[in-house]
Image (cartoon, rainbow, N blue to C red):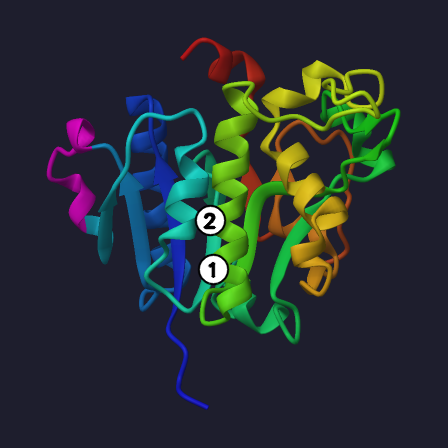
């Protein structure tokens, strides 16, 4: 088997806030893992010379979910995506790729005991369990490359209302899948993993002690056993103002 390249993918679009946050995130990765390869995906209008902290640079547009496009274009075989509004705080960041094992893709989880931190995870037809704040995936596998591209494409259709689950009459099934779900890329993720036959054999995993890899700032109690690796400063008020 060939040696697989490994690297971290950080996407910053729509606001200089995310661009500056992404630069800080990359700096925090390299503080604990100086040899880390980092790919910054951002808009050309934000470039100010500081983007050179990244090892690779890709340009994106300002779509609300440009992050999924960036994830699908990762230059690394083993890729670890991290939301831009995060900070690495532990040396175990270097060993995250060892977590993948035989899985194709891995996420942290939207659990009921952390539901106070999330706006919407339950709906009449199911429950979103996979959190898109971080994602570890193997781009050397064709099924993963297709999955990442399909996740982005389906989310674009979901956002512009050209796709939604339909009922027996061929109408958008808002009774089982409320329209409010359309704002979450976790829903398009849920659909592909649970309803798309193409991905029935995709091996999707949850990190062991998963909260340490995506520890939300709004958590009010400890949700992991080992030390926190990534702190996530997600704030809906900040994002809604951008």
Whether residue 51 appears in magenta in the rendering, the answer is yes
Residue 84 sits in quarter: top left
Tell me the number on the disc at residue 145: 1
Q: Is 152 situated above or below 34?
A: above
Q: Quick check: marks 2 and 1 in contact, CB under 8 Å?
A: yes
Question: Is residue 3 shown above or below 179?
Answer: below
Pointer 2 residue: 149
Give the percent coordinates (x, y) of residue 35.
Answer: 31, 69
**Residue occupying image coordinates x 61% and y 45%:** 214
The quadrant of the picture occupied by the C terminus is top left
Q: Position of residue 201 (x, y in %)?
A: 71, 65
Q: Is mark 1 on a helix, strand or loop?
A: helix
Q: Is residue 110 left or right of residue 157?
A: right
Q: Specify the quadrant of the image occupied by residue 118.
A: top right
| Frontmost residue, 217 versus 157 | 157
Task: Name the residue nearer the viewer: 37 or 35.
Answer: 37
In this rendering, position of residue 193 left or right of residue 116: left
- Residue shown at 61%/69% (left/top)? 100
Residues shaded magenta: 44-52
């Amino acid at each position: 088997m060939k040696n697989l390249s490994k690297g971290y993918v950080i996407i910053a679009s729509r606001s200089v806030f995310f661009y500056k946050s992404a630069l800080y995130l990359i700096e925090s990765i390299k503080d604990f893992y100086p040899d880390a390869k980092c790919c910054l995906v951002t808009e050309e209008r934000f470039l100010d010379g500081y983007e050179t902290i990244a090892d690779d640079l890709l340009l994106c547009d300002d779509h609300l979910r440009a992050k999924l496009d960036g994830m699908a274009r990762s230059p690394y075989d083993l890729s670890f995506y991290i939301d831009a509004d995060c900070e690495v705080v532990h040396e175990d960041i270097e060993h995250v790729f060892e977590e993948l094992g035989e899985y194709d893709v891995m996420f942290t989880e939207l659990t009921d005991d952390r539901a106070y931190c999330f706006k919407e995870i339950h709906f009449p037809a199911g429950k979103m369990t996979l959190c898109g704040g971080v994602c570890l995936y193997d781009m050397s596998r064709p099924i993963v490359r297709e999955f990442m591209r399909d996740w982005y494409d389906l989310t674009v259709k979901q956002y512009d209302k050209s796709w939604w689950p339909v009922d027996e009459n061929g109408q958008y099934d808002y009774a089982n899948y409320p329209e409010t779900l359309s704002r979450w890329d976790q829903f398009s993720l849920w659909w592909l993993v649970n309803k798309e036959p193409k991905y029935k054999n995709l091996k999707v995993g949850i990190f062991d002690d998963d909260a340490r890899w995506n520890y939300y700032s709004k958590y009010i109690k400890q949700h992991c056993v080992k030390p926190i690796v990534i702190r996530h400063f997600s704030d809906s008020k900040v994002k809604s103002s951008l």
